[in-house]
Amino acid sequence: MQTILTGELLFSIVLPFELTNGNDGRGSKWFSSAKLREKFERDLRLMGFVRTPFDVPVVNHVTRLFGKRQREWDSSSIGRGSWKEIEDAAVACGWFHDDSTKYIKHTLFFQKRGHGKPETLVEVFAAGEETGGKLF
């Protein structure tokens, strides 16, 4: 068993992006992750969300803020959809050097009811030291 420790909160932002869960044909020929990533990057740049990369390894907390007439998803569905394209767009906008585990140690997913339209809360924490251990 591994314990994921988070340190200081470095950055927090609510993005006006609705997370998708990949149940809408992600594996089909018509889905283009590159087009979606480009759209997220364009939107981040238009909103002025370009920054300097964090200089320490981080742990990302990504919270799906679901809107009216939406419901909670299975916990495993939160991270399998459009987050990857949002993360890649954030890398392109300078948030992270890249998305390798050298810079982003872990990404943890959460969900809760938002305050209207679906949004995505991104919290970036300094990565604490990891401890390994045996489950049994």
Image (cartoon, helix red, strand yellow):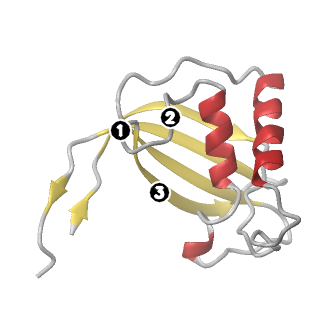
Can you tell which mark lies on residue 98?
A: 2
- Look at label 2 and name its amino acid: Asp
Which comes before the other along the chain, label 3 or label 1?
1
Which numbered disc, 2 or 3, marks the residue closer to the eye?
Answer: 2
CB under 8 Å between discs 3 and 1: no
The answer to which quarter of the image holds residue 82 is: bottom right
Can you tell which mark lies on residue 108?
A: 3
Spot occupied by residue 67 in the image (x, y as percentages of width and height): 80, 61
- Closer-to-camera residue (135/65): 135
The answer to which quarter of the image holds residue 2 is: bottom left
* Total marks in image: 3
Question: Which type of secondary structure does the marked residue at label 3 adopt?
Answer: strand
Can you tell which mark lies on residue 102?
A: 1
Question: Which type of secondary structure does the marked residue at label 2 adopt?
Answer: loop
Q: Classify 10 Å Cα crowding around label 1: few (below 14), some (14-19), many (20 and above).
A: few
CB under 8 Å between discs 1 and 2: yes
Q: Classify 10 Å Cα crowding around label 2: few (below 14), some (14-19), many (20 and above).
A: some
Q: Residue furthest front?
A: 29
